[in-house]
Structure formats: C-alpha cells, structure tokens
Image: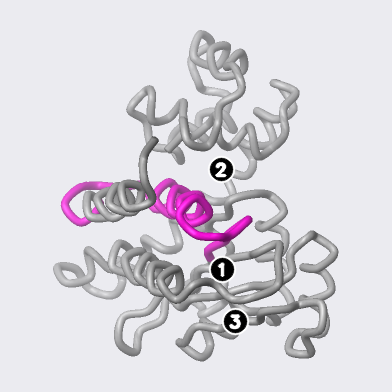
Amino acid sequence: MATRETFLAETFLRLADTLVADFDVIDVLSGLSARVVELLDASASGIVVADPGGALQVVAASSDQASLLELFQVQNEEGPCHDAYRLGAAVVDPDLAVSTTWPSFAPLAVAAGFRSVYAFPMAVRTQVLGSVNLFLTNPGLLAADDVVIAQALAHAATLTLLQNQAAEDAHRLTSQLQRALNSRITVEQAKGVVSELAHVSTDEAFVRLRAFARGHNMKLTDLAAKIVRRTLAADQRAELLASAPISRDQAK
C-alpha cells in the first residue's frame, strides 16, 4: 500500500506537471481537494478563488456537503475561507460547537457533522487568490506536520494558477480564472445529468466524470460540456452511464 509520503510526492508531481503543459484548472483543483482529504486527518475539503471582481467563488470540493458549506461562506461573507482570503493568513477553529467567531457558519458546519476547521490562504507574497478549507469531524488541532503540508499544498496550487503570469500579463490570469469559474458551472450541470441518468449520487457522478475523462485523454471541462450540450458520442455516453462504481482513489 502506498505510504503518505508517496501520495504527497505524487501530488506535488502532478502540480509540477501543470507548470510545463496545458492543464484543466478545475480538474487540477478538484484533484487537489480530494488529495488533501487522503493526505491529512480531514473529512472534507473545499477550494475557493476570487473572481475578476474580487468576489470569492467555489471552484472545487471533495464532496457536495463541503461544496454547500463553501457556497454558504462566499454568499454570506462569513467563515474560515473568507477570513483566510481576507487576512492572507491561516485560520483555525478547533471546536465549532462552542465557536463565537462565525455565528451563522459554525452551527451549519456542526449540523453537517464537522467540529473543527482550517483554512489556508492561496497566496504568494502579498497576492492572495483564494483559500483551501479543511473540515474535520472531531474537535481539536491538526498535527504540526499536517499544517505545514496543507499550507505547502495551498502554496503549490497558487503557483499552478500563476504559472503563466510570468510570461503573460495579468489579463491572461484574469481570463483563466473566469474560464475556470464558468467551467465549474458546466461541471456541476454535468454531474446532475450523470447522477439522474445513472441513478447515482452526485459525488459518485463526479468521480465517474473524472475517471472517464482521464481514461479517454479528455479534459474534464470538455467532457462536461459535451454532456451538457448532448454532443458526447452515443457509445461513450453509454459507457459512462454503465460504469461500475468507482472509488476516489481509482479516479486520481
């Protein structure tokens, strides 16, 4: 069985690959969101980035439950991801059940089964693009090594988004982020289509989409667009809908 060190090395290698090749932002960040749950003592994770107007948007989550909590935060401007982005520093609450920091978010997170939370800024120097959230089912703090790993992954994700900025102007980065946010909507729509037609949960539908895209050398967002526009070849559509349940490890 692969060790955590192996998983961590593979994660950084995949992020490094984006520095020299064309890549799908949503797929990369979705993969990272799933990986941090595997690597750290967390139950769920989510990633938000700022759109061109400076408003935070949800771009990835390890589950629909995490996605809903992230969406609540960005819509209400309250919660750890909002504070980590605004402050440019890590934010932690070791026990949401007694927290007074976020009066609306904390009870919602506890009702969803989470008792503690971390948020790490996606930042390089003074530039902050968003944040990475970790949700834990038990109260308490992460181990010191886990905190270092989480912040390193958030930093690596930031470099991934900024990889073209050195050669291009800021307009390219803004356009890339906007395309990523638009693509997120298409992916969510495709999840709903696959979920309904295959009679599986939306979490399982997303795992299938990622696995199918990788197995057919397609970008996740391109596959999602074909599903939404109903242009995916009939045989591929049948293959996707008939897939056996896929674990998240198989889809990575």
**Image point 63% across, 37% down: which residue?**
191
Q: Pointer 2: what residue?
A: 187
Q: Nearer the viewer, mark 3 or mark 2?
A: 3
Of the image marks 3 and 2, the number of the one nearer the N terminus: 3
Does dot 1 land on a helix, a strand or a loop? strand
> How far apart in space, not on screen, are marks 1 and 2 (Cα)?
20 Å
Q: Report if residue 164 lies within the magenta region.
A: no
Name the spot of residue 241 as percent of width and height, x first. 61, 18
Say if 171 sits above or below 200 in the image. below
The part of the chain drawn in magenta is 18-47
Of the image marks 1 and 2, the number of the one nearer the N terminus: 1
Say if 65 sits above or below 215 in the image. below
Of the image marks 1 and 3, the number of the one nearer the N terminus: 3
Label 2 packing within 10 angstroms: few (<14), some (14-19), many (20+): many
Say if 132 sits above or below 76 in the image. above
Does dot 3 land on a helix, a strand or a loop? strand
Q: Report if residue 27 lies within the magenta region.
A: yes
User: Residue 133 has which mark?
Assistant: 1
User: Which quarter of the rendered picture does the N terminus lie within?
Assistant: top left
Please state which amino acid type lies under the numbered disc 2.
Val
Q: Pointer 3: what residue?
A: 92
Say if 130 sits above or below 181 in the image. below
> How far apart in space, not on screen, are marks 1 and 3 (Cα)?
10 Å
The answer to whether the residues at label 1 and label 2 have Cβ atoms under 8 Å apart is: no
**Image point 24% across, 50% down: which residue?**
13
* Colouring convention used in this rendered image of the protein: one colour
**Image point 22% across, 73% down: which residue?**
169
Q: Is residue 199 left or right of residue 12?
A: right
Name the spot of residue 114 as percent of width and height, x first. 74, 64
> How far apart in space, not on screen, are marks 3 and 2 (Cα)?
30 Å
